[in-house]
Image (spheres, coloured by chain):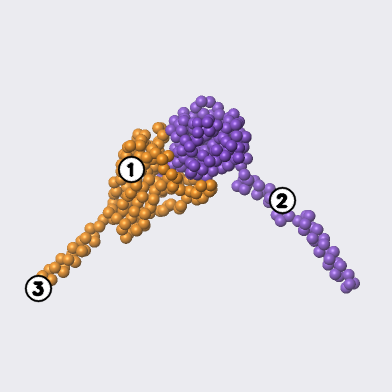
Chain colours: A purple, B orange
Amino acid sequence: MKKLLPYAAVALLSVLLVWQIWFWQPVPDTATAAHRQLGLAAKPAGGDFRLQSWRGPVALADLRGKVVLIYFGYTWCPDICPTNLAIISLALKQLTPAERAQVQVLFVSVDPERDTVERLKTFAEYFDPDILGVTGSADEVAAAARLYGAAYRRSEQAGSAMGYAVDHSAYTYVIGRDGRLAQTLAHATPAERIATVIREQLAGT
Amino acid sequence: MQKSFAIAVPMFALILGLSAHGARAGDAVTVTDAYARAVPPGQPNSAVFMQLHNGGDEDRALVAAASAASDVVELHTHRMQDGMMQMRKIERIDLPAGETVTLKPGGLHVMLIGLKQPLQPGEAVAVTLTLDDGAELAVTAPVREIAAMPPMHGQPGSGQPMPQPAGH
């Protein structure tokens, strides 16, 4: 009987090894699925949306073939949004007219309650006539933001004459000519860098 | 000889003592490079930025600001939380002794809410700052187009958090 012991041990270990390789999961499948739903790890896919501007509906799909920059913000924002739009307009000014003709910048307002399309027109054009302000119903804006992973949240400001602020991620989303989300640029990325990224997208690199 | 000393020494001490008390905290805090940002027509809010240096040896704080340029003036800051930039009103901006605190885009600022007129480059905004000891500082902030300025915060390509606001 003793003689069989080593063989039994080997057999047991072999079974364990096979199980380890083929069947064992480090984390149960349900937890993996839950992690996928968190969204933070998942890259936003981008995608088409349709919003309103002073000159009518604007569908991202209609801009296929152009490089599109999208920035989510709101006009009551005294600092972050003007800073980013000013930098974007500086980047546009570094492009040649031929290059500019192939670029569209969209400023999406996450504050449709205060930002009418007329107000957006005045605001956006102050920075550059080629920046188009768009917005829509709360649901439409939310749907567009979700596609790009843009976060925003209304925050009541009791005790401040602001009324409410809209907290928001301040990224600039770069959509390539094929309509796909190519890059996400951080808040206050310098104008030179933005111009370089636009040129890379125009060249298709 | 002794009589002169008897008078001179206390006089000297008195003068020294008086001059020490004579330095008001308002003198200790100075403002440099103040400016207001130009805004698009119709935009109701703007911000004033500056550097505040506390040259004294006592901690101070900025607790209020006023201006005829807007309905309301508040102290605000930005912080990055939950992946979003959040702007919040704060009650004070601490000015530690011997240090310089910078109000700049994306960070601490004096917020003008409800502008009474659009701010154009070439104009200037008069702001009165009130410190915690009651001292008032008169500041003239010329209006600037921020587009002309390089970004003063954040690193390219990273969404890193803003510096923690003072006195929050």
Q: Residue at x 62, y 40 (%)?
A: A45
Reading the image, the residue beneath label 3 is: B1
Which of the two labelled residues, at mark 3 and mark 1, occupies the earlier sequence position?
3
Q: Where B44 falls versus B8 (above or below)?
A: above
> Residue A161 placed where, x, y %?
40, 40
Q: Residue at x 66, y 47 (%)?
A: A36
Q: Where B81 falls versus A197 (above or below)?
A: below
Numbered disc in front, either 2 or 3: 3
| Amino acid type, label 2 | Asp
| Amino acid type, label 1 | Ala
What residue occupies the far right of the structure in this picture? A1
Reading the image, the residue beneath label 1 is: B141
Q: Residue at x 55, y 38 (%)?
A: A199
Side of A46 relative to A77 (left or right): right
Give the camera-side residue of A153 and B84: B84
Reading the image, the residue beneath label 2 is: A29
The quarter holding residue A141 reads: top right
Are the residues flagged by discs 2 and 1 from a single subunit?
no
Q: Where A69 falls versus A22 (above or below)?
A: above
The quarter holding residue B1 reads: bottom left
